[in-house]
Amino acid sequence: MAQTTTSTLSGGTRTENLASWAANLKFSDLSEDVIQKTKDFFVDWLGCTIAGRHHPAVSAIARFASQMGPSSGKSELVDGSLNFTTSPAFASLVNGASSHVVEQDDLHNRSIMHPATVIYPAALAVAQDVGATGEEFIAACVVGYEVGCRVGEFLGKSHYERFHSTATGGVIGVAAATAHLLKLDAAQTLSAIGTAGTQAAGLWQFLMDATHSKQVHTGKACFDGIFAAYTARDGLLGTKDILEGPRAMGVALVPGTTNPEAIDQNLGTDYEVLRSSFKWHASCRHTHPSADALLKLMDKNGVAFEDIESVTTRTYQAALNVLGMTGRGETVHQSKFSMGFVLAVVAKKGQAMITDFTEDDLEDSSLREFQKRVNMELDPEIDRAFPEKWQGTVIVTTKSGKTFTESVEFAKGDPELPLTRDEIERKAHTLAAYGGFTDTGKVNQLIERAWNLEKEKNVDGFVF
Amino acid sequence: MAQTTTSTLSGGTRTENLASWAANLKFSDLSEDVIQKTKDFFVDWLGCTIAGRHHPAVSAIARFASQMGPSSGKSELVDGSLNFTTSPAFASLVNGASSHVVEQDDLHNRSIMHPATVIYPAALAVAQDVGATGEEFIAACVVGYEVGCRVGEFLGKSHYERFHSTATGGVIGVAAATAHLLKLDAAQTLSAIGTAGTQAAGLWQFLMDATHSKQVHTGKACFDGIFAAYTARDGLLGTKDILEGPRAMGVALVPGTTNPEAIDQNLGTDYEVLRSSFKWHASCRHTHPSADALLKLMDKNGVAFEDIESVTTRTYQAALNVLGMTGRGETVHQSKFSMGFVLAVVAKKGQAMITDFTEDDLEDSSLREFQKRVNMELDPEIDRAFPEKWQGTVIVTTKSGKTFTESVEFAKGDPELPLTRDEIERKAHTLAAYGGFTDTGKVNQLIERAWNLEKEKNVDGFVF
């Protein structure tokens, strides 16, 4: 059944416009490319979720869910080995934490956030709770992407310097997606957005000591956004202008300038889900343009790993900020945030897939030596174009004294260079195997079901 | 059984010192005045919790707890009419929301936060979950006050301009109190503090439109702090320097300067619970010094409500910021944040108790007329002393043209002018009656039990 409520707010704020749009969107409004892309990222997310299931943070959060939550419920954990169902708040808490572990989930360029890891776990769990159809689930995910990414873009680059935007924009996207599935009207959706925004949190400090907050941020964004929408349905009033108000997020959480027009311009014309990028490499997305440029340079000029004396990458400020926090990279997770280590991996192995970052790799002296000979520089032109464009330039000096330069305008997986369905499927199989799930027939079956999601009467059973 | 673990961190950060202290505190370390004051605020909190139970936000949150949480558990809701027990995370979510509704819970001056409304609901629910004794519960509350208020003081005045410190400091206090009850060691306590801090949130925007975020902030601070400590126990690593680190709270959530020494100076010598203030009036704490000064002025000079032409209150900047947000005060809750309305109430009724703010009062034209003739001014000297001292000066001009001035250095309820046990009991009875609970025998019985809390084998049964 499609959304039937129609309600529009007339207070004239941008946030009201966004809430009205979110409450009124119907599946029948969606173009074929929006539907297809939403399914692409769903398959991509499923693989990420099963891949992350053995992380200690996920285990701790799953235990919290079993201790604090109900012993059964309508919502499922993607990790079937845990063998429990629960309420949507807890299912999404665990699935959301799990799907951000291996750094292979999508990235929305303009907002610098990872929408899949918050929107899908929440929308899936709530859709299961309310018995939504595949169509309703897809529409809710589109709403979640749209609202979350627009908020992330509103908060902008300077916010991202301090906050993990995936959590702060994400919690609002989750609230909107959940509100849509609960068929809230525009005023209730606005309440949900307000209550979500006043819970927005998530700091980068954890990158300094390789701790587990990244999983907390995504899991809790799901839980908190669901809290916001269910309580809005039941009469809890959220503040109405949580983005642009005088004591709201734009003032409190943004040291620089915001992008107000991002909140509501071209609503219903542009779709943010079309602007999200797949991650091909299993490393921080800020390393991808440089990694692609390096691979291209080596291929074009016949330069081998052993030939390289030094690499200079020219990049944007946000990359310097994030990648500068992890030092040498003492853990597998942290090593994916070291530009030097990631470039060493791609140069040596020709790729930086999930199986290319192991404890053994951390001890590989050839990688560690190479890592030291990589440095990062700010490129003002690249920085100006960011985050609209995530470009990269590398300058390689060889041991024989030659210098080569190569740039990429788009990284593999960007909207302009998306993965093919075949690549998406291969990636999902690799991720499932990494998570220790070896039943490839079951993986194929889940993927096949996802490709036909709009025909499904419900979205139960996405369990590995 | 007293805490038996001994563990001390040696990294040398202030946050490590705080975590080590929190993990190692024993009930036997506490002086009699600390124990007594902790019980005083507990009784005060019980009354606030039952008084707030009918608020729509509390109802919505209770419904969320019943939908998302377990159908039974060891932790109790103070509102016995709801007739359910649940997990500690959900019990504290509901009790925490309820206890901040009527604006009668305590206020810790230096940190500008309300510790009781977050520390007691969380510590009570967790103590019930783990079967802690009265002594263990008291020690955990002392830890919660100490850690929460020190973090609030560290974040300081400029943080409070944007954030509801009760939530942002509170979530860390809750994590520490919970960690203490779970008998976590210092390293695990530090993890809990880190995970709590990266969830810290709560914006003032809701004051602009009289919405319900204040209840969300306190309830969620409980839930999120409990999440932080239970997951820390189970292996989730929180970041180690969430207060002073380069991407931590002090940088991201504080536009001005922090007070680093507040984190760990005089630990074990000073006790923050001794520095918290009771609220006597049922209005925003920023109105209390002016209300007391006005009552004193009227009494001393024989000035009656009808005699007053205008009132000027001289106060500190934080009061101007918070009280300036609510306009005229369209709801009962909002009216408690209007200096003009609160002074009208005290001038007319000689008090501003919980029963003095009603829908009828909002329509009382004599109060509304008086309200218009009150204005606030910044007093630089008072502002400099804040938040160490919450002082107030009022200047009254009478209709016959006389001018009177009166100041108070401390408001009634301040550590220097605390409530007596008799006043605390009377206040609790008034609050219970306000909440519609009329069994005064039961109230007396709960109070009596609280006065002897350290002798209790468990803390079950604090249910109205």
Image: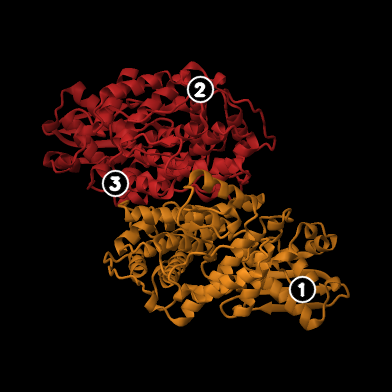
Chain colours: A red, B orange
Disc 2 is attached to a residue of which chain? Answer: A
**Residue occupied by mark 2:** A135
Q: Residue at x 72, y 69 (%)?
A: B352
Which quarter of the figure has residue B25? bottom left
The amino acid pointed to by label 3 is: Pro
Is disc 3 placed on a helix, strand or loop? helix
Disc 3 is attached to a residue of which chain? Answer: A
Residue B146 percent across, percent down from the top left: 44, 69
Residue closest to the eye, B175 or A320: B175
Q: Residue at x 57, y 27 (%)?
A: A267
The mark closer to the camera, 3 or 1, is: 3
- Tell me the crowding category of disc 2: few under 14, some 14 to 19, or many 20 or more residues within 10 angstroms, Cα based: many
Q: B415 left or right of B290? A: left
Check if mark 3 and mark 1 are on a common chain: no
Say the numbered circle drawn on residue B350: 1
Residue B441 percent across, percent down from the top left: 63, 71
Residue A294 percent across, percent down from the top left: 24, 29
The amino acid pointed to by label 1 is: Gly
**Residue occupied by mark 3:** A56
Residue A109 vertical position relative to residue B419 in the rendered view, above or below: above
- Tell me the crowding category of disc 3: few under 14, some 14 to 19, or many 20 or more residues within 10 angstroms, Cα based: some
The amino acid pointed to by label 2 is: Glu
Residue closest to the eye, B47 or A219: B47
Q: A454 left or right of B425? A: left
Check if mark 2 and mark 3 are on a common chain: yes
Return the disc, 2 or 3, that comes first in the chain's sequence.
3
Is disc 1 placed on a helix, strand or loop? loop
Is disc 2 placed on a helix, strand or loop? helix
Check if mark 1 and mark 2 are on a common chain: no
Q: B211 left or right of A212? A: right
Residue A70 vertical position relative to residue B366 in the rendered view, above or below: above
